[in-house]
Image: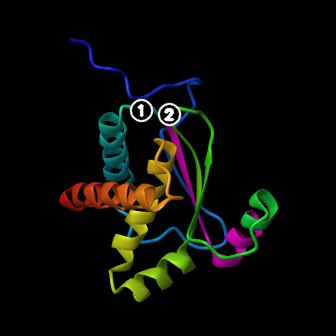
């Protein structure tokens, strides 16, 4: 039995995982890039989607607010905005406000690292085809986030 190739490379210089920081430092609480890539590769396999490229751009509330206004015409703070590059593949750019994640973690009474990884999983799950607009979709998204959080915490 041949297993599908979960890495699609359109160009030789495509990296499956990219971490950037705009007006903040990369969070120290992040697992290593190798651990993150392993996590996202397993997620792609389980979701039956090819992993092409994930780019996470960590930024401040103000930076993400500008992105939200400019590209989505939404004038409010959010923890993550996901832009899908390729349909039916885990391929896109995700902007994460570390300010919002830190505030949400404090509000929820969970460690910052846990909330950061939950938000990262949330973005990847959007790229895998999960929504969160209806109560049913939101419940499924939360269940998937929890499932994948258990896996990254086991690494």
The quadrant where residue 65 appears: bottom right
Find residue 39 and report its horizontal and vertical position in percent.
32, 48
The residue labelled by disc 1 is 49
Nearer the observer, 132 or 110: 132
Mark 2, secondary structure of its residue:
loop
The residue labelled by disc 2 is 89
Nearer the observer, 39 or 128: 128
Sequence order check: which comes first, mark 1 or mark 2? 1
Locate the C terminus by quadrant.
Answer: bottom left
Residue at 37%, 22% in the rendered image:
5
The quadrant where residue 144 appears: bottom left
Mark 1, secondary structure of its residue:
loop
Compared with 98, 94 (above or below) is above
The answer for how far apart the CA atoms under marks 1 and 2 are is 5 Å
- Residue furthest top in the image: 1
Find residue 25 and report its horizontal and vertical position in percent.
55, 72
Find residue 101 and report its horizontal and vertical position in percent.
49, 76
- Residue furthest front in the image: 135
Bounds of the magenta span? 52-67
Circles 1 and 2: CB atoms closer than 8 Å? yes
Residue at 33%, 81% in the rendered image:
110
Compared with 112, 132 (above or below) is above
């Amino acid at each position: 039995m041949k297993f599908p190739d979960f890495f699609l490379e359109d160009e030789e210089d495509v990296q499956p995982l990219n971490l950037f920081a705009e007006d903040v430092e990369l969070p120290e609480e992040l697992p290593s890039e190798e651990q993150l890539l392993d996590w996202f590769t397993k997620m792609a396999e389980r979701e039956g989607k090819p992993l092409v490229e994930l780019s996470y751009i960590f930024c401040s509330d103000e930076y993400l607010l500008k992105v939200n206004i400019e590209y989505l015409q939404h004038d409010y703070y959010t923890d993550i905005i996901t832009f899908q590059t390729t349909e039916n593949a885990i391929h896109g750019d995700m902007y994460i406000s570390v300010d919002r994640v830190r505030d949400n973690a404090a509000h929820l009474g969970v460690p910052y690292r846990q909330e950061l990884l939950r938000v990262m999983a949330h973005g990847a799950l959007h790229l895998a085809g999960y929504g969160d607009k209806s109560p049913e979709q939101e419940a499924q998204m939360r269940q998937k986030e929890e499932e994948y959080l258990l896996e990254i915490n086991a690494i």
